[in-house]
Amino acid sequence: MGKMLTEAQCATFERDGYLFPLRAFSAAEARGYRDALEAYEAGTGDAIHSNMRHKVHLLFRWADEIVHHPRILDAVEDILGPDLLCWTTNFFIKEARDPAFVSWHQDSTYWGLDPADVVTAWVAFTDAPVESGAMKFLPGSHKLEQIAHRDTYAADNLLTRGQEIEMAVDEAEAVDVPLKAGEFSLHHIRLVHGSKPNTTPDRRIGLAVRYIPTYVRQVKIDDSAMLVRGEDRHGNFELEPRPCADLDEGGLAAHAAAMERMIGAVYSGTDVAEARR
């Protein structure tokens, strides 16, 4: 037995490359996180977008609380070990009856992290039934190593480069990943996954938290991450500070610096890197 996962659950993750559903917090607590996000959006008069959807744990205390949530960290520790960094967070929000989608891809394609011991915890702020554009996983595909991708920059694709794998996917082999508010899934950095548009009358809100053990290296750039559990004995990343308050001066500065690094890594080798700075 691990801190949260059973031996059988760990074996399932090793075999399939994913695990769900797992409960982080109650539906009422999930509603509280949604309310915090939407209070920010109401204050700006617009949905959270662009760089503000990324590295959000550096900006908001409530997002920092999620990446440090003990149930999420316990599950990730059972897979990756006790010394953990949060490399980034990314909001994946599909508005009601929205054409936005996520093409079939592997997370590892442009991230520059080595080795591929990286786990995403996808945390549901709202119910995410199949009809809302829930994720779909291709079981066992994390064992295929890195697959070639092509960039599409498609307007409705939620991925940074609209990247999609250059491999045919048999949809009949894919597994739907519906979640209830307050639940989360775990998946491996090389697992092939995607999602379809939201056809429901409510938003589908998920926060993807990317965890790495401290021995993982960034091979593209000098990078930063936040220590969330254990010790960092390797020093491969500049350690990021926790926010003292929502959108405080230190958090905004840390976020700006971290986004500069991330854009450099994710868009490396393209003309977009300079355009996005």
Image: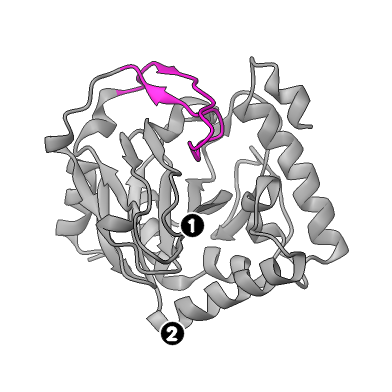
Q: Which residues are magenta?
A: 145-166
Are the residues at dot 1 and dot 2 in contact (C-beta closer than 8 Å)?
A: no
Q: Label 2: how many residues lie within 10 Å, few (<14), some (14-19) or many (20+)?
A: few
Q: Is residue 70 magenta?
A: no
The three-letter amino acid code for the residue at tag 2 is: Ala
Q: Which of the 4 quarters of the picture holds residue 64?
A: bottom right
Q: Label 1: how many residues lie within 10 Å, few (<14), some (14-19) or many (20+)?
A: some
> Circle 2 is placed at which residue position?
28
Would residue 184 be found to the left or right of residue 269 on screen?
A: left
The quadrant the N terminus occupies is bottom left
Q: Earlier in the sequence, mark 1 or mark 2?
A: 2
Asked whether residue 4 appears in the rendered view, the answer is: no
Instruction: Note whether 78 is above or below 13 in the view shown.
Output: below
Pinpoint residue 238: horizontal percent, then vertical percent.
Answer: 72, 43
> Circle 1 is placed at which residue position?
95
Q: Which of the 4 quarters of the picture holds residue 5?
A: bottom left
Instruction: Note whether 234 is above or below 21 in the view shown.
Output: above
Pinpoint residue 183: horizontal percent, then vertical percent.
Answer: 35, 68
Residue at image location 69% in from the left, 71% down from the top = 42
Q: Main secondary structure of the magenta part?
A: loop
Of residues 65 and 168, which is closer to you in this image? Answer: 168
